[in-house]
Image: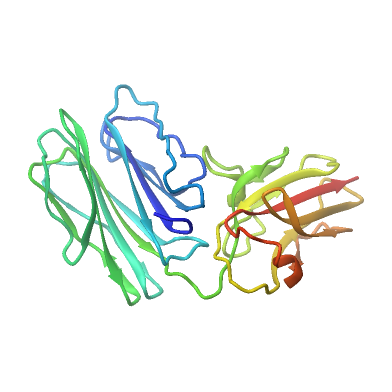
Amino acid sequence: MQAKDGMLLVTYANVDCTISSPAGWLPAKAQQSPETDGITAAVWKRVAGVSDPGATLTITNDGTSPKAGAVLLAYSGVDLTDIVHKINSRLDTGGTASVPTPQVTTTIGDCRVVEVCVDKSTSTTQFTARPAGSTSRATVIGTGGGHPDISAVERAATTAGNYGGGTFTLDANQSSAITYTIALAPKLNVQTARPQSDVTIGGYTAEPTVGTGVPLAARIGEAARDDATYLRSPAGPTSAVYEARLNAVEDPGVDTGFSFTVVLSSGGGATSAQCEVALVQGTTVISSTTFTDLPATPTVYTLNVTALEAANINDFGDLRLRFTSTAS
């Protein structure tokens, strides 16, 4: 694994529990369990930064004496804006040794399809078969009563269409299982950076509110503009700061200008409102523009980064957008 690889993290436990969100990771598929006291699992996604290779990742859950684990998969050549193109899951309440995977329908070519099986069993010692045409990438077999197992495979998906629907086979019946089919998006020629995680919240709140482990950035990082989801500054703000880390993008290798579009508005009866929007690398401001007289209607504004300013960026994996709001 190296910086700018796309990473999938599958976390699981053999008891009813809540698996905590790993720091810096986004949910690709929320936690699920087929039944009470069945296997519990979740899938997370992240683009690797320069400090990720060799780092220790801690995952916790609140289960009572759980048998738990995790598998980390890393892939190069994927879209750094959002590595997951499509994902689907299937819940199985057990009683069989064969566990099907769900299907996904891709709308673009050159994806990579990953199929995963996580199960709970007492007697299994191996996976005897995996989805046809795939390459095995990871397998972990537990031990003892009610232990968890996991296997992950992948295949190329050169054309758009239906993928998944394969079968994992164990050497004994499982008592509950979850399978996933995940289509990874290919790397694009045009790169897009969107808010991905929170750096500084500064009293801002999300509309609608976000769930546990979900960053406020999820409300402003959508691929298609949605004015029904947004962040709200504190009431009567004076230089109130919210800062979001952007997803990592590759260094283009040339110092050309680029731009960010943001949607801003005023509210709460403010008679005067302004917002400074800054592109920041670490703690260094690369470019900033203050937008004044913000209207009550959500309006698109553009932060233009010149070629001279872009030349000061030396780590495209550590870019943030900082919003500083003032209103009266």
Where residue 297 appears, x then y in whole percent? Answer: 79, 60
Rendered-image quadrant of the C terminus: top right
Residue at image point 27% right, 52% down? 116
Tally of numbered discs:
0
The answer to whether residue 23 is left or right of residue 314 is left
Residue 269 shows up from this direction: no
Residue 134 in picture, x, y percent from top left: 21, 63
Which residue is drawn at the image coordinates 47% and 65% (left, top)? 79
Which of these two is toward me, 40 or 303?
Answer: 303
Q: Position of residue 129 (x, y in %)?
A: 12, 55
Residue depicted at 67% across the width and 58% down the height: 227
Q: Is residue 325 above or below residue 263?
A: above
Q: Residue furthest top?
A: 64
Indicate the quadrant containing the N terminus: top left, top right, bottom left or bottom right: bottom left
Q: Is residue 30 left or right of residue 148?
A: right
Instruction: Check the image and name the residue furthest to the left.
Output: 171
The colour scheme applied to this rendered structure is: rainbow
Residue 210: which quarter of the image?
Answer: top right
Residue 71: percent from the left, percent from the top? 32, 45
Residue 46 visible, this angle: yes
